[in-house]
Image: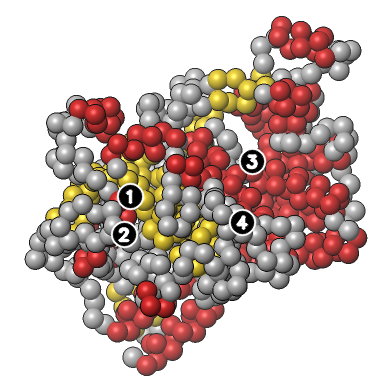
Amino acid sequence: SSLLSAMGCAPSKAASVDDSKQTEVQVTVKSAEATSEREQTKKATKSEPLTVNDYYKTVKKELSEGKEAEGPQFIAFARYLGLDPAEDKELLWIASEALKAPVPADWTEHYDKRDKIFYYNCKTQASSWIHPLEAFHRETYRTITDFRHSLSEAQQAEELKRLKLKYEEDVADSALKSLDWSEHFTANGDQFFFNKVSRSSSWNDPRLAKAHELNLQKKTIEFLEGKNKSSDTEKESVQESDSALQKTVSAMSLGEGSPETVAEQPSLPVAEPKDSSLGLEVLHLRGKEWFSLCQLMHVTDPENLGIGRDVRVAADSYNRLVPVKAWRIQRPNHWKIFDATRSIVTDDLEALRAKGIMAPRVKSRLEDAARWLGGMDEKSNEQILLHGTKPENLLTIIHGGLSERVSGGLLGQGVYLAEDPSKIDQYCTPDVGPENAALAPLHAELYPGEQHPGEVFYAIVCRALLGMPVFTKNGKTDLSRPSEVIFRASDRRELALVPESSPPISYHSLIAEAGPADEGYTLQRHREIVMFNCNRVVEQYVVAYKREWSAEPLKAPDWIEENIQPGPAVQMGDVDIHIDDVTDSVGCYSCFPTAKKSGASPKEKLIELRGMRDDGLITAEEFESKKKSILEKM
């Protein structure tokens, strides 16, 4: 608080979108006429402070009228973004750009009952008081200041070369990706946009936010080259800024929406704050999100259920884990910490890359199953993983998150995660129901006014930033460098430094591979991932599941069969091939043995090929070439 006050900002409590205790930063304006800190404090207490949210509303109206953002409130907003108006007067254009930033395609802007602006992410279904692109503008400021104050002349030349290359790549990538979007209108004439690759819709023109980012990148490069030394009196006008944005947008052409394309208009969230003591929201037991959680808990190795040093039941008493209920964890403050940590991890990886040290891309067995739970950031090696726990610990985890301070095991004092539900199941103990009076507070939160489902177990679905991982087979030394230890000290609380990293950077995660015991592997059945910084982990869902035994194969739910219809005919040369909406509507459900699967080899190849294109493994040109080759063979 004292730091924010010194910057001209002061925090105050405000009702949160998901948590009434969430605080909101307030911007207060220092008087230029005050001659002492005491006089400034007195003056600040006499007037009602202006929040960032209030300023956004005011300035949006002014900008729409063609006015410039200026004055003491604008200076205070610049301080809020981290700028020093005295030292960084020529960088105030960053604050101006932040006020003009459009909302990305996945986000929508809303007003609550108190007329406060908040933003809703249609993918993650999370809400935030903070503009989705605010972090991008903060990062732009850090890029410039680091360039000017931390790099030598030779390093500046290399950094400028890197920024130019990245800008050129982003321009080309944006132009290509914009072709995946097509423009549509509702029956009432409302415009929306549909992405034929991700099968998602947006009320916002998806090009606007990307064009804004590209323009900011371009202005940064021009500034560092000395071409654009903007001062407070030489700021770009609103009209000039809008013109530059539209010019960039016009270079990003939309694709054509074919007559066969069925573009569903996006749904709007209820623009109401959600108050919950723990920030829990019950999921409906149908739809893509629930189905993804079912896939995450699907056991591919039932022979390993009931095996492990922590298991207290007979190994042959069950052969499947069946989810019966799930909750989304709505903790916006935890997500803010996680988002900030993601940026730090990404910066670390970029620093390592500059030294020629490349982080391996970690692939998880859960990637396909988790595809409907929101995108994962490849730059930070983000993955969705599982954690098993006792019901006695669940309330603490939901409220405060997992912590490496109270966790430990064979691989050190960290948060233990896994990609196999059969692995995390061995750490779970049953919640038998109301007869366990000690769990009454948990039941009040999870099952208010409803019947307890009977004996259940709980799994946590988490996101983890694996960053630069170190691999091991024995929990002591590096798998690829057997002479290198993986911990910095004998207490095994912090991982070793990455060799040759400068400045020194520690490994971000530990991955213990599984293998034969006679070859020195500590783990024989499943690999484990251990995180030694809880800020690199965020809890996203709680899943209640039952242990069951059945000789019959697990069937896909009836609602899936009802909602899977043959997809639109895709014109490929002179051949029409119907690609089912299986992967587009409900994700991959190959985990259900009885699910209908096409035996057409060319069709399977085309679906796989499309997936490779969507994942960025091949370019659009390579996709067309390979597609043509498959059709010729047919």
For the residue carrying disc 2, how many other residues have a C-alpha within 10 Å: few (<14), some (14-19), or many (20+)? many
Badge nearest the viewer, 1 or 3 = 1
What is the count of numbered marks? 4
Say which residue appears at 39% left-offset and 87% top-offset.
630
The residue indicated by pointer 2 is 423
Q: Which residue is mark 3?
A: 134
Q: What label does residue 388 carry, if any?
A: 1
Regarding residue 256, the answer to whether it shows in the image is: no
For marks 2 and 3 on the same chain, the one whose residue lies earlier in the sequence: 3
Q: Which mark is residue 456?
A: none
| Contact, mark 1 vs mark 2 (Cβ under 8 Å) | yes
Q: For this rendering, which residue is in front, 477 or 378? A: 477
Q: Which residue is mark 4?
A: 488
Mark positioned earlier in the residue sequence (4 or 2): 2
What residue is shown at x 38% (from left), y 34% (from top)? 396
| Dot 4 or dot 1, earlier in sequence | 1
Say few, some or many: other residues with alpha carbon within 10 Å of mark 1 (under 14 / 14 to 19 / 20 or more): many
Q: Is residue 160 above or below residue 22?
A: below
